[in-house]
């Protein structure tokens, strides 16, 4: 009887090891069944590292989105007036990482931030102290960059840090290069200012 209990004592662990080995082989692909090749789209690990233009937005896209978002959200018909524009990390085509616009709708003021992830509105209690920007009467940022390509290319290291428009003046700045540089342009005609 004693020899039988020894055999039973070892059978359970041996059976467990065999089961674990079979399961491990099946999981690892050792089952002998040929794998089917299918292409899965939109699954797995996604690279979230910013890449050139795919995470950038145009000024026109930002302006349209801010105007329509604010109108839809507030369900108001009073037009949004723009008083300040700032783009950050701008490439040679005028696409920015984000656009910030100081806007007013009647007595309500806010700063709208638009990027490839969407819009954020930050209510602003203090008065926005800039003159109104009429988007249809200014040189668009992409056109300004295009018309002063040689001068501005000196600022892009590899991106232009910021492009700001307030009180009729574009100020383009780059602080990330070896030397901080900036240029000013008339927003109505794109002429260089000294």
Image (tube, rainbow, N blue to C red):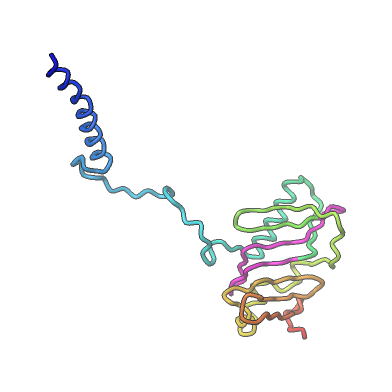
Residue visible at 63% across and 53% down in the picture: 118
Choose between 6 and 53: the one closer to the eye.
6
Residue visible at 79% across and 70% down in the picture: 166
Residue visible at 59% across and 73% down in the picture: 159
Q: Is residue 38 left or right of residue 117?
A: left
Tally of marks: 0
Choose between 170 and 6: the one closer to the eye.
6
Name the image quarter holding residue 36.
Answer: top left
Q: Is residue 4 left or right of residue 169?
A: left
The quadrant in which the C terminus is found is bottom right
- As displayed, is residue 60 above or below residue 8? below
Instruction: Single out the residue that lies furthest toward the front.
Output: 2
Q: Is residue 170 left or right of residue 5?
A: right
Residue 173 x %, y %: 69, 76
Residue 12 x %, y %: 22, 24
Q: Is residue 102 magenta?
A: yes
Prevalent SS, magenta region? strand
Magenta stretch in the rendered image: 85-109
Residue 42 x %, y %: 44, 49
Q: Is residue 60 magenta?
A: no
Residue 27 x %, y %: 28, 40
The quadrant in which the N terminus is found is top left
């Amino acid at each position: 009887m004693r020899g039988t209990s020894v055999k039973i004592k070892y059978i359970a662990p041996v059976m467990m090891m065999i089961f674990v080995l079979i399961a491990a082989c099946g999981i690892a692909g050792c089952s002998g069944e040929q794998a089917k090749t299918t292409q899965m789209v939109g699954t797995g690990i996604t690279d979230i590292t910013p890449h050139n233009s795919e995470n950038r937005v145009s000024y026109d896209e930002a302006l349209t989105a801010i105007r329509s978002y604010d109108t839809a959200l507030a369900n108001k018909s009073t037009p949004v007036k723009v008083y300040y524009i700032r783009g950050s990390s701008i490439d040679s085509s005028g696409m920015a990482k984000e656009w910030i616009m100081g806007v007013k709708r009647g007595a309500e003021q806010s700063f709208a931030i638009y990027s490839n992830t969407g819009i954020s509105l930050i209510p602003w209690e203090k008065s926005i102290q800039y003159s109104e920007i009429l988007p249809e009467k200014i040189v668009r940022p992409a056109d300004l960059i295009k018309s002063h390509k040689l001068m501005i290319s000196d600022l892009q290291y590899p991106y232009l840090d910021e492009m700001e428009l307030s009180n009729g003046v574009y100020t383009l700045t780059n602080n990330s290069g070896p030397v901080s540089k900036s240029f000013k342009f008339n927003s109505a005609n794109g002429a260089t200012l000294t």
